[in-house]
Amino acid sequence: MVNKVTVKDLVCYYGNKCVLNLLNIQIMKNEILNIIGPANSGKTTFLRTLNRMNEYNLLYSYDGKIYLDGKNIFTMKVEQLRRRISMLFAMPTPFPMSIYDNIVYAPKHLKLIKSKAEQNIIVERVLKDVSLWDEVKDRLNWPAMKISGGQQQRLCIARVLAINPEVILFDEPCSGLDPISTAKVEQTMLRLKQKYTIVFVTNNVKQAFRIGDRTAFFFMGELIEINNTKQLFHSPNNKKTADYITGRFG
Amino acid sequence: MKINPKLSQQLSYCILFLVTICAITPVVFIFFLIIKNGVPNLTIKFLTSMTKDGGIFPAIIGTFTIVVCSIIIVFPVGVFAAIYLNEYAKRNLLTRLIKLAIVNLAGIPSVVYGLFGLSIFVMFCKLGVSIISGALTLSIMELPVIITTARNALNNVPYSFREASLALGMSRWQTVKYIVLPNAMPGILTGTILSIARISGETAPILFTAAAFYVPHLPHSIFDQVMTLPYHLYITSTQVPCVSKTILFGTALTLLIIVLTISLFAIIARLYFRRHRKW
Ligand SMILES: Nc1ncnc2c1ncn2[C@@H]1O[C@H](COP(=O)(O)OP(=O)(O)OP(=O)(O)O)[C@@H](O)[C@H]1O
Ligand SMILES: [Mg+2]
């Protein structure tokens, strides 16, 4: 197992309020790392620190080190970092453009693709990766906002795949979806594991059990426990973890 | 006392309908009056001959150039200022003061802008009474309005679009250019259309800065003074004895048509951006 991301002594604040306290985590290449924990435990803050999305929030401050392949992410060019560590949000966020344009938007402007033919190939490939191709191949110039919520979320995943990142952060990507769409997104994630490293925040304990190789349990800004998903669920070391996964609070 | 809900529903519907009618009646009436009295006078000769031959050609050219010049100045400056304030400026005291100042500037009477333009552009910058002085004065007057409408339009673009774009490795400027601005453009242009109408009709700001009572020739450059339609209308209706009504209404109708023509460009641009936005 190769180390992809290393987080060392990370502390995050909003104003004076400490929301992540001395976090140490290693994320392995090609794994799905679950992050579970009750509301306000700092899961979203952790993801948004990994690709520096909180940078424009004046309340936010951090301390500690994060390395991507051994390089400090805080000294990288932020656009470069976000191309390598991209992010998916809880609500689908398609742009008000066609399905096709949504996918080629970033690669085109980042000059990752040159010809129209290349664009077509990428659109087909990423839509197949999220198993959306068969559903939309006849209407690629439809407004992306007119397809269903589940399809929109998979389109957003496809849009991320089109820039070919190394790590993808999923922040509760299924929270607004029905069970069938949820299952499709889950299958997609399992398939993506072969090529990408995935950090998966979820509020759904069962879903975490189904998906992740390892699971980290956050509570009130602290990493309480991190272990293989099976082990963590069958024999948690910490009482809080046990309480949370058996649904006694959260 | 209890009112039957169905009755009260119908009552409020009636009241709202009547109020709407009251609101649009004067507008319709004005349009009707101007068109009815103006059209007979709208001959080629009236539109294209010089003032001494009874035409308003110099005033048409004057109004047209002043309005186009000031839109060319105020539109980019206003939009970029709005982008800066909304997308880049840190939320500190200075930014708050600037925003407050802009809101208040929009409430200043236009004649004050006229005096300001006279002292700054005409006298201090030595631009003289000229098209450029008038255009600059009108720009300054309209700047707060454009900034405010542009900021509203930018604010209406959901924050999630920006975040989604940034998360794909796009820079902030790319996000503004490709996502935020195209989606805000219809709103910005609606504001611009209203501004064009306001700029075209103003007399006070150009009274001391650009407009002349009478110029025997057409302007040679933007440093010449010109006749303008609103001022010409004011002069002919108040200062010149026994001018026929039809000439006045002809001038007013011409002004309306010019406003519509210039606005048409903005309307077409707005259509273009609406088409390209796929909600
Ligand atoms: N933009 C912000 N400004 C100030 N405080 C914030 C901000 N975002 C989050 N917080 C605070 O930081 C703490 C952690 O929030 P965070 O969103 O990381 O939790 P979470 O684990 O993702 O919760 P949830 O499961 O509800 O999504 C919370 O107490 C929250 O109130
Ligand atoms: Mg969250």
Image (cartoon, coloured by chain):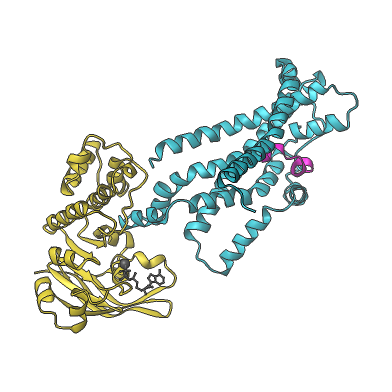
- Expressed as whole percent of the image width and height from the top left, the position of residue B154 reads 49, 51
Residue at image location 10% in from the left, 76% down from the top: A234
- Expressed as whole percent of the image width and height from the top left, the position of residue B249 reads 77, 25
- Expressed as whole percent of the image width and height from the top left, the position of residue A167 reads 21, 61
The picture's colour for chain B is cyan
Residue B207 among magenta residues:
yes
Residue B181 among magenta residues:
no
Could you tell me what secondary structure mostly forms the magenta stretch?
helix
Residue at image location 75% in from the left, 46% down from the top: B122
Q: Is residue B226 visible?
A: no
Residue closer to the observer: B160 or A77: B160
Q: Is residue A222 visible?
A: yes
Could you tell whether B159 is left or right of B38 in the image?
left
Residue at image location 69% in from the left, 37% down from the top: B22
Figure check: B245 above or below A33: above
- Which segment did they paint magenta? B198-208
Residue closer to the observer: A98 or A30: A98
Residue A171 lies in what quarter of the image? bottom left
Residue at image location 73% in from the left, 21% down from the top: B36
Quadrant the C terminus of chain A occupies: bottom left
The picture's colour for chain A is yellow
Figure check: B224 above or below B257: below
